[in-house]
Amino acid sequence: MLDISRYIQHFFLEISMSHTTISSSQSDHLQRFIFDNSPIRGEWVHLNQTWENILRRRDYPSALQQLLGEMMAAAALLAATIKLKGRLVLQTKSSGPVSMMVVECTSQYTMRAMAQWDNAAVGESEHLTELTGAGTLALTIETVDNPKPYQGIVALEGKSIAQVIENYFTQSEQLPTRIVLAANAEVTAGLLVQQLPSASQDEVEDEAWSRISHLTDTVTSQELLTLPAEIMLKRLFFQEQCRLLKASPIQFGCNCSRQRVANTIQLLGEKEARKVMIEQGVIEVVCEFCNEHYRFNQQQIETIFQQKTTSFHSSTVH
């Protein structure tokens, strides 16, 4: 039998991923940097309040915390490579204890994230494939001026989310990329260096890329999580002409609202909504991103469909 309430929950999750409202987190930011003598760009991200906003809404197991935190940092880094207005979504689907993770970052740098997991099956291991099993990572880019999103998919193969994303750039974009990610219960951070898309092989010296990517690999999780960008980059690339650009603030944001849930119930249809009311006495939807609960009683459901009928008749009057 179809679980109608679960269907509403899933449908609301699918349609809710659009405009966002903002919760303040002034300390979180992303910083771009460039190498003056090489067509190589870099990005550094540090999330504290945004990450805490995610964690306080759901009780994630510690192993999943690290994985989701690294995916948060990765999404921010990748969104910074996109100049168009819209949003970037990283989503895993897999057969293991962690069946799904979703992280969204908009071009205004608002972020939210969620995961679905089997609590009994998630152990202490932080190894990617032990948590996810076989599966895929999808990178979706939606822009306001293009109704058809771009999507790239790569297998969840490797020791970490960073390695999976590096594989994606190698296979799909042919852009040499190095990513380092770190997360704990308080902070998530990341570092990305990448050849510029417009650079030819002649422009990028093999020695320069090899040197910079090797230096990137030497950064430790402790450095990523604790050092400001300026200090860390000076330590890491002290022999390079590395120049920091203006920082961009990042904030938690979730677009869910009571009206959006009401719209979802309308799309479900009056017959199915009434069926849920008969069986359960109430329709309740929980936003899986921010854990906000929305409850609708019989009178409120009646109002939703009365408004729909009134709107329909108004639109057909000439």
Image (cartoon, rainbow, N blue to C red):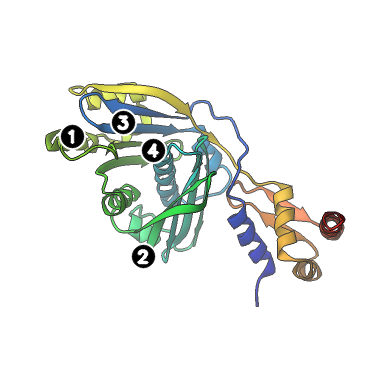
Type of the residue with mark 4: Thr
Tag 3's secondary structure? helix
Tag 2's secondary structure? loop
Point out residue 12 in the picture as x, y percentages from the top left corner: 64, 56
Q: Earlier in the sequence, mark 1 or mark 3?
A: 1
Give the label, 3 or 4, closer to the camera.
4
Q: Nearer the viewer, residue 146 or 138?
A: 146
Q: Is residue 111 above or below residue 147?
A: above
Point out residue 266 in the picture as x, y percentages from the top left corner: 75, 60
Give the label, 1 or 2, closer to the camera.
1
Q: Earlier in the sequence, mark 1 or mark 2?
A: 2
The numbered dot on residue 223 is: 3
Type of the residue with mark 3: Glu
Tag 1's secondary structure? loop
Residue located beneath label 2 in the image: 134
Q: Earlier in the sequence, mark 4 or mark 1?
A: 4
Q: CA distance from mark 2 to mark 3?
A: 31 Å
Q: Is residue 232 visible?
A: yes
Q: CA distance from mark 1 to mark 3?
A: 31 Å
Q: Earlier in the sequence, mark 3 or mark 4?
A: 4
* Quarter of the image where the N terminus is located: bottom right
Residue located beneath label 4 in the image: 81
- For the residues labelled 4 and 2, say whether their Cβ atoms are less than 8 Å apart: no
Q: Is residue 133 visible?
A: no
Give the label, 1 or 3, closer to the camera.
1
Residue located beneath label 1 in the image: 203
Q: Residue at x 65, y 47 (%)?
A: 256
Q: Residue at x 31, y 37 (%)?
A: 192
Answer left or right for 289 relative to 164: right
Give the label, 4 or 2, closer to the camera.
4
* Quarter of the image where the C terminus is located: bottom right
